[in-house]
Amino acid sequence: MAGHGTTHVDAGSLWGGKVSPFSTSYGKLMMWFFLVSDALTFGGLLVAYGYTRHTTDSAWPIGEETFDSLPFLGHGFPLIYVALMTFILIVSSVTMVLAVEAGHRMDKKGVIKWMIATIIGGFFFLGSQAWEWSHFIHGSHFGSVELDNGSRAIVKGHFGEFQSLTVVESGKEFKEGKTISPSAKGHYKMDADEMFHHFRHASMNGHVHDNQFTLHDGSVVKWKRHADEHLTLLVKTDGSGKAFEKVKKIEGKEAEKEYWGAVNSGEKGRIIYGADLSSNEYGPSQYGQFFFFITGFHGFHVFSGVIINILIFLGVARGTYHRRGHYEMVEKTGLYWHFVDLVWVFVFTFFYLV
Amino acid sequence: MERDDIIEYSLDTHHSEEQGKKIRRKIWLVTAILTVITAFEVGVGMTVHQDSPSWWIVKLLFIGLTLLKAGYIVLVFMHLGDEKKVLKYFILVPYALFVIYLIFIALTEALAVNAAWDQYGG
């Protein structure tokens, strides 16, 4: 496509200077060198991920369990969202290669059209990744739970929403005897999500006892909520952190007793929600760290790719490359953009699929 | 100063409307292939669970399909397949050698560390 492969260069001019032994321009060759070094960085990161995964004895999270949500639709859609992200990136790679092809025909309008499409695709991917990070950091309504025997389980099911909170002990803001609910007046009015937000905060810090928890103002409230549905605990590791051969499933009454027993124990750290750099509800702490670093580093590449694409697009729109007589700059930025897609193909496989 | 290198090689890269048509057909074909592979991977990932006995086959299949996708992206989208052979191997061979060695040594070491944890605890 680049058209060099067929160009015959005889030995005389090859060694006589002015001819690249690779039959390619300086700029493109340097872009390839840069991409090789960048590929080594990503290769190193993914190999480090594989190393950690093979050294640890505790069960590693499974992609289809961890990433099973869609925006607005909730959970129960394993891998669909990341597949969508992959598809967005593949499509924007295609529009990029079409822009390069249009450039080879000196079709300025075509280059403009396809570069705009590529930039839009890049923004879509970045937006998707922002949502995914936000979802990963906030986690599920249940979080993960440390059982009485010290093992940790991830929790599946549908969380029963909060209906109301009755204040049993006054604080600075909320007074005893009053009820916080979606239909209450003033600052006693809270919807289910807000109530959950307060509960989550208390639960994370071990401020929950006997179905009561402490609000940020120091008041203590007793909750009324719908029943949980399909509550299931998946125990993957024993008390010492070693992985079981087979995942142990706890369901029904026993799951409820174990989970809410741990919540009501008032011990800090029994329930972990979402992820940060020190712990996460999905699995070993390294899992979260690698997730943030690898997808973050890739996202940073996408971001800089979009910026470079915009700069090159401005050059195209102003006719700079048309006057120059060739669209090689589009080809070079295209190489970088395809590389970003290439890295994602590997991240997709090793982070989400296997 | 005029950059003769850039102009000399870049002018070569133009192609006609007719060639363009052919190239575009190839691009869309590769798009379809990549999409189908990804959809297939997601389908298998959703149906076969990691604790099933045939998981290792699926795992190898995923890695194979990933390399296939990577091949299409590098050789067609990045045009490396159309460059001179010497450039192609100049880029691919050193990288492949290094990464295969890195994977080999890292995973071997990781399994040894894992075994040591098993034996001596931690």
Image: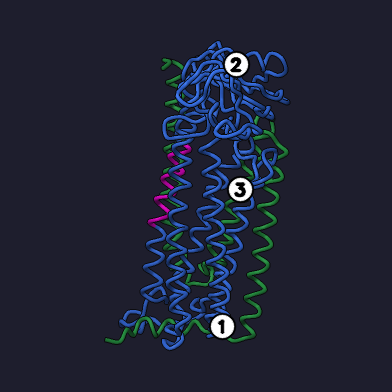
Above or below, comparing residue A243 to residue B58 in the picture: above
Q: Is residue A189 magenta?
A: no
Residue A47: tell me if it is visible: yes
Give the SS element for disc 1: helix
| Residue ID for mark 1 | A109
Mark-to-mark CA distance, 3 and 2: 37 Å
Chain B drawn in what color? green
Q: Give the main secondary structure, helix, strand or loop, of the magenta stretch.
A: helix
Mark-to-mark CA distance, 1 and 3: 33 Å
Counting from the top left corner in percent of width and height, residue A283 is at: 52, 29
Instruction: Tell which of B94 and A275 is nearer to you.
Output: A275
- Say which label, 1 or 3, has the lower sequence index: 3
Q: Is residue A43 magenta?
A: yes
Crowd band around label 3 with a 10 angstrom C-alpha radius: few (<14), some (14–19), many (20+): many
Chain hosting mark 2? A
| Residue ID for mark 2 | A211
Above or below, comparing residue B25 to residue A296 in the picture: below
Where, quadrant-wise, is the C terminus of chain B in this rendering?
top left
